[in-house]
Image (tube, grey):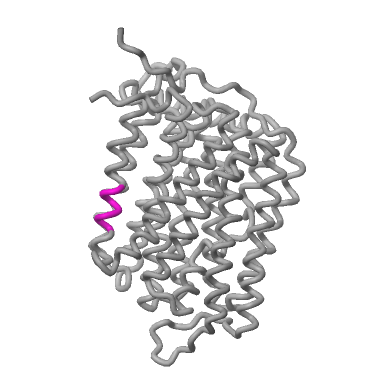
């Protein structure tokens, strides 16, 4: 059966990138939510969990190094980026099966290493998907497309995180590794096979071995990427923006899952909270992208960034008021019980945070896409995204240690304050436009048989 070319129409492009980002979200939700929750429930220290979450983002922080290979090494049969997408998704599924046999409670370093490898494949996949998106998406659909892409990621996070937690009682936690691997494999079979890329513009290769030719092309692309970063004020300042937290992050990292377990929520309740949170974030991610297309990227992003800090500051105040300051081991027999009012506030503020986080993510990546030069998309745009993931890594790591040393309220306040610093960068970015038109060879309309 001949699959339609998803890249040939607006609806097909939006659907394709939504589903591709879904495969990014599933393992992210599984490792960052389901596994982190199980770690805390089994008594692992919050600092160790924070370090584990921080380690997961390290491959994403260096994914700029994968960009030149994605841009240069291509297949005329599979397309410039589709081969990378299919291959990395297959390796993600295999790595999950390997991790299934390792007990994180007794072999945490080995388990962390395997999950880091999983994220290496996921980060390379992301570089290929983003490069394809920059070249294929039209400017007037980028806001909505980015909203749908991150909406798909949020839905994947919900399925891999909350969905797994809800199913744990029925299938067991170890079997959930197999379930996640199968979900990734199914999407791999259905989506990339429905995308057709035209080969990019022909590139002259120097003489000598293929390895030498690839090295020459990598040097050429590296030079082009550096020039692209310096091509406009917006492209240069986007580096600074990417190195700063865009809003408050603590309620999307291990702090939320740690606090949920300590406040007495069971796996089903944690799963329900995560599911509702990701559904809200996914919906408002689309809304945020749509609003940015109409009212401007910088204006809407500034409002949404400020909005993410409000629930964090309110939760910090009430945790202080109820005396819930430092982490409490959930396995203690006589541990204190949280007041019902505090638990209800936690639910409300966690859901409120998801609304603003979704709005922010729907706009944040579109800004980086606007200043990216399509010819070196996998290198430049991936570099921006890598820097934002470096922020996630160092934020999760310092917050895990801050929770133990200073307590939850102080961590939430510091996180919110740091998240507002980026607002001073936005007014100076200027026009958010890249220097080149989209690559006309990135995708071709589907041929109609005579």
Residue shown at the point (61%, 47%) measured from the top left: 242
Is 274 positioned to the left or the right of 322 in the image? Answer: left
Residue 369 versus residue 446: which sits nearer the camera? 446
Magenta-drawn stretch contains 179: yes
Bounds of the magenta segment: 177-183
> Residue 157 at x, y = what percent?
42, 54
202 relative position to 84: left or right = right
Residue 128 visible at all: no
Up-down relation of residue 302 to residue 342 (above or below): above
Q: Main secondary structure of the magenta part?
A: helix
Looking at the rendering, which quadrant does residue 115 occupy? bottom left
Q: Quadrant of the N terminus?
A: top left
**Residue at 35% across / 76% down in the picture?**
42
Tell me which corner region of the image, top left, top right, bottom left or bottom right, holds residue 295.
Answer: top right
For the point 52% across and 49% down, the residue is 283
Residue found 34% across the figure and 68% down from its top: 108
Position of residue 282 measured from the top left corner of the image (x, y, whole percent) = 50, 50
In x, y percent, where is residue 294?
Answer: 67, 36
Q: Is residue 31 magenta?
A: no
Q: Nearer the viewer, residue 337 or 249?
A: 337
In percent of width and height, residue 391 lies at: 57, 55
């Amino acid at each position: 059966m001949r699959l339609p070319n998803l890249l040939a129409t607006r609806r097909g492009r939006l659907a394709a990138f939504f589903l591709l980002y879904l495969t990014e979200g599933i393992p992210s939700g599984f490792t960052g939510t389901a596994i982190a929750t199980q770690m805390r429930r089994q008594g692992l220290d919050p600092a160790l969990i924070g370090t584990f979450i921080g380690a997961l983002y390290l491959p994403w922080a260096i994914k700029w190094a994968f960009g030149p290979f994605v841009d240069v090494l291509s297949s005329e049969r599979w397309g410039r980026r589709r081969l990378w997408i299919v291959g990395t998704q297959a390796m993600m599924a295999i790595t999950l099966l390997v991790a299934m046999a390792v007990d994180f409670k007794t072999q945490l370093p080995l388990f962390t290493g395997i999950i880091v490898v999983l994220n290496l494949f996921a980060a390379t996949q992301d570089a290929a998907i983003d490069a394809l998106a920059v070249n294929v998406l039209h400017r007037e659909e980028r806001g909505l497309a980015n909203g749908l892409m991150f909406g798909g990621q949020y839905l994947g996070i919900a399925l891999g995180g909350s969905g797994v937690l809800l199913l744990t009682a029925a299938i067991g936690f170890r079997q959930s590794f197999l379930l996640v691997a199968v979900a990734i494999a199914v999407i791999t079979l259905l989506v990339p096979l429905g995308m057709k890329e035209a080969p990019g513009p022909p590139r002259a290769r120097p003489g000598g071995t293929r390895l030498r030719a690839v090295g020459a092309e990598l040097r050429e692309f590296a030079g082009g990427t550096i020039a692209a970063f310096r091509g406009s004020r917006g492209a240069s300042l986007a580096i600074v923006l990417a190195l700063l937290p865009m809003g408050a992050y603590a309620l999307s990292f291990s702090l939320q899952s740690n606090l949920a377990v300590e406040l007495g929520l069971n796996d089903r309740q944690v799963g329900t909270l995560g599911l509702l949170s990701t559904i809200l974030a996914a919906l408002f991610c689309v809304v945020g992208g749509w609003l940015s297309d109409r009212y401007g990227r910088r204006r809407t992003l500034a409002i949404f960034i400020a909005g993410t800090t409000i629930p964090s500051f309110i939760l910090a105040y009430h945790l202080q008021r109820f005396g819930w300051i430092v982490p409490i081991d959930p396995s203690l027999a006589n541990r204190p019980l949280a007041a019902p009012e505090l638990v209800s506030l936690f639910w409300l503020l966690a859901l409120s945070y998801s609304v603003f986080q979704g709005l922010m993510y729907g706009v944040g990546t579109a800004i980086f896409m606007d200043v990216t030069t399509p010819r070196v998309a996998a290198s430049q745009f991936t570099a921006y995204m890598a820097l934002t993931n470096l922020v996630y890594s160092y934020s999760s790591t310092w917050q895990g240690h801050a929770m133990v040393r200073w307590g939850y309220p102080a961590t939430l306040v510091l996180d919110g304050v740091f998240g507002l610093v980026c607002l001073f960068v936005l007014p100076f970015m200027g026009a958010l436009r890249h220097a080149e038109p989209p690559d006309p060879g990135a995708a071709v309309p589907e041929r109609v048989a005579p």
